[in-house]
Amino acid sequence: MPRVVREVAVAGVYQTKQGDLSDRMQAEVWFECAKGACEDAGISLRDVDGVVYDGPQGAGIRDKLPGAALGYDLLGKPLRYHASSSIGAAMTSAGLNLAVHAVSTGLAEVVIIVNALAGKPEGSGNVDRDKAIAAMAMNSGPYEYVYGTTRVSDYAVLANRHMHDFGTTSAQLAEIAVAQRHGATLHPLSVNGHRGELTIGDVINSRMIADPLHLLDCCAINQGGGAIVVTSADAVRATRRHKPIGLLGYGEGHSHIDPNSSPSLSVFPAAELAANTAFELSGVSRDEIDVAGFADHFTINVLFGIESAGFCKVGEGGSFVEKGALKIGGRLPTNTSGGFLSFSHARMCGLFTLIEVVEQLRGNAGARQVADAKYGYVNGVGGAMQNNFSAILGEV
Amino acid sequence: MTDIAYAKLLPEGIPSWHQPYWDSLKAHSVKVQKCSSCGALRYVPKEICNKCLSTAYSWAPIRPTGEVYTYTIVRRAPTAAYQAEAPYALVHVAMDDGFRMIAAMKNADPESVRIGQRVKVAYEDVTPQWTLLQFEPA
């Protein structure tokens, strides 16, 4: 049976410029990301023998059997491992746990996770904004979408209840968008950095989409790609290219499909479960965390992330984020690349959250660098707080 | 039967065992599942009671009243047909019988909707085949 035999670390990462890649084939972007992460790691794409999440898009059964597609067809040899996580747009970042497991147990040597959105796909990846919004609205299922729900309204009801229960304000939520935009202005690959800094007034005076969420409380709708490759920590050390950053703790919490089943729509025990498991397994305490990456489809997600991880008491997230606490140099630097709000919300975008924390812990974040960042916290959310993962990262 | 005049989204992929709920809406007398073992009511339809894990149930009438647990006002709607009615309020209602239901708020200014507001079930016959559950001020 598989058992842990060695430590595992991130070997390489890569991200494309985020934005409109509709003139490129998805598979072309996929391979650009895969090769880019391998180059960062100092290895060849030929060394990859495991994949987590999807391969490059293709026709027919190829999309259902990504491991097989990356066997003789694409990499010219049998692949040793494939697995996939189910945590929504975080299935790429939660997939780090699967990749680490595969390498630590000897099921594979080098595992890659690639996220790529490009071309002119149907559905939520559509470059036609109206069509993308309509497709995402269907995610709520027929007992909700018949009423004209949207992805924004799915979260707006949670935000409204949080405001009702705890007195959270729109200005507090705006602090999150403002802090993250600052990071995006310092990241040349971000989709919204070129738009410049935001003020709280900019956010709360932007168009209301679904009360209480304004346009600037919502993530970007864009395309882009990224990849992360992991191998044994010894192999990463041997290349002397990067500090070996690994998974110190990990946990999941699967909550509900039907919002009517969730005991509360402002407090999420399953998210707390994920965080508690990750912290317990890591032996790292909350106050040792130097940098965080929270799922941020909407600003309110970050409050849920902070509260459920125990960085403050439940209900106190609003006051926690005030006065620039999430900015680089603040109390808990968060989504320092801009997050989904300002860096990228392309497809399974949790990967970008993870990559930014890895860059911070390696000390490679350039103008965004958080001084002496030793431990990082990452979470990811599927659906509207329907499932969650938490991870603690640090040098191994 | 074509529903060509109705441009908004209709339920798709509803399993046949959910049909008694939709039939009860058509009859303007909503019924939800009642666990045959512990008596708990549940909505939306689910295969097992999450309180006692019994799979036995009947379809039971409910008190059609409750209060708004949370809500939003949609200003940017998913499709043109919904946008034509925006802004509109969506409500999550804590029913007096102890479970929650989601629908739109009818016969009310969306700006007037508040958490804690008393509401009652309304029925909207949207096509000859489909009736939707809605809420309105009690």
Image (spheres, coloured by chain):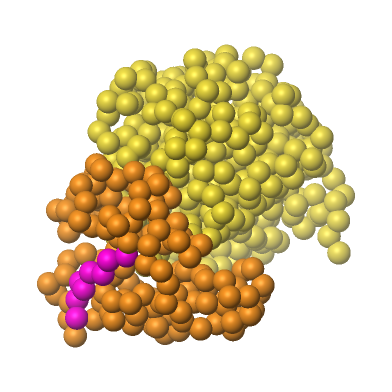
Q: How many marks?
A: 0
Classify the position of the N terminus of chain B by image quarter.
bottom left
> Splitting the image into 4 quarters, where does residue A143 fall?
bottom left
Q: Main secondary structure of the magenta part?
A: strand
Taking the image as drawn, is residue B116 in sight?
yes
The colour assigned to chain B within the rendered structure: orange
> Splitting the image into 4 quarters, where does residue A340 fall?
top left
Direction from residue A265 to residue B38 in the image, left or right: right
Q: Is residue A184 magenta?
A: no
Q: Which residues are magenta?
A: B121-128
> Splitting the image into 4 quarters, where does residue A328 fall?
top right
- B133 and A94: which is toward the camera: B133
Taking the image as drawn, is residue A190 in sight?
no
| Residue furthest left as drawn | B5
- A264 and A352: which is toward the camera: A264
Q: Residue at x 17, y 66 (%)?
A: B7
Q: Residue at x 69, y 53 (%)?
A: A98
Q: Residue at x 33, y 82 (%)?
A: B23
Q: Is residue A209 above or below residue B18?
A: above
The colour assigned to chain A within the rendered structure: yellow
Where is residue A225? Give x, y as percent: 46, 43
Q: Is residue A82 above or below residue A216?
A: below
Where is residue A359? Give x, y as percent: 61, 28
Q: Is residue A186 above or below residue B16?
A: above
- B24 and A226: which is toward the camera: B24
Direction from residue B57 to residue A209 in the image, left or right: left
Q: Residue at x 51, y 62 (%)?
A: B98
- B47 and A92: which is toward the camera: B47
Classify the position of the C terminus of chain B by image quarter.
bottom left
Q: Is residue A103 above or below residue A283?
A: below
Where is residue A307? Give x, y as percent: 60, 35
Direction from residue A291 to residue A3 in the image, left or right: right
